[in-house]
Amino acid sequence: MTKFRSAALTDIGRVRLENEDRFIHETNTQLFGVADGVGGLPGGAEASSETVKIIIQECSERAPHTAADLNAIVLKANMAVLHLGHKISPACGIGSTLTFACMRQQHFLIAHAGDSRAYLRRNEKLQCLTEDHTVENEIRRMHARGEPSHHYLGNPSAITRCIGQSDQLEVDISRPELVAGDRYLFCTDGVTRMINDRELDHLMALPIEPEALGREIVQLAVNRGGPDNTTAVIVYIDAL
């Protein structure tokens, strides 16, 4: 059985009146991640709360040793948030990012939509396991495929995928193998807007417990102005 240590922390920051971030930290079912209500839309807290509720509910109904169809689980959360949006914001809907993982058979199954991120630090090197679903990145992907882009670059950081905004949501799924010594970070853009990858690499190398690392990351983002809600979920893989 995989041995791990983990922690989850969130902070409202210094500007926002409400924390629309939510985290997933279910050690019994080995489920970890973050969700962030989409800025510019109403009901951000409702969207992220509903997203997390459905993910936890669906994954908890499956034993940790059984296969998990993350795409189907995320699409179920997507439809739940879509329907909730019809009730509380019929004009424009509601939305949430989602980046989460569950341990299965010595792998982390990771599902991702939006601009929250998953990082892995292994062999003294940090890598981002997800790609932000933003206008800028979508244009870059379409150009790389030789396809014309119809996106307007007026707001390059606007997200192009989220939970609750489309019944045809495309979910990114990855399956990294777990290795003893791995350190994982799941975080919202309140972290990554204020702390660059080089700094995150330095922080994640610190010889401290997951909760202390989470505090270091969240507090640094807040100390730099805290313009957004800030959430981090940390997982250390100790042994397999």
Image: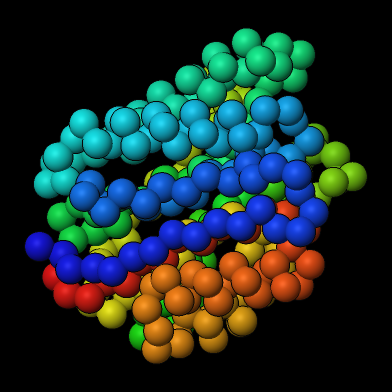
Q: Residue at x 21, y 31 (%)?
A: 61
Number of numbered discs visible in the structure rendering = 0
The answer to whether residue 62 shows anywhere in this view is yes
Image position of 51 with respect to 157: above or below: above
Question: In the shown orientation, is residue 218 left or right of residue 135?
Answer: left
Image position of 125 with respect to 41: above or below: below
Q: Residue at x 68, y 69 (%)?
A: 221
Q: Residue at x 19, y 35 (%)?
A: 62
Question: In the shown orientation, is residue 92 left or right of residue 153?
Answer: left
Question: In the shown orientation, is residue 175 left or right of residue 191?
Answer: left
| Quarter of the view holding residue 202 | bottom right
Question: Residue 48 location, x and y as percent?
Answer: 55, 36
Q: Residue at x 41, y 47 (%)?
A: 24
Image position of 60 with respect to 23: above or below: above
Q: Nearer the viewer, residue 19 or 154?
A: 19
Question: Residue 99 location, x and y as percent?
Answer: 48, 48
Quadrant position of the C terminus in the picture: bottom left
Image position of 58 with respect to 237: above or below: above
Question: Residue 84 location, x and y as percent?
Answer: 56, 17
| Quarter of the view holding residue 59 | top left
Quadrant position of the N terminus in the picture: bottom left
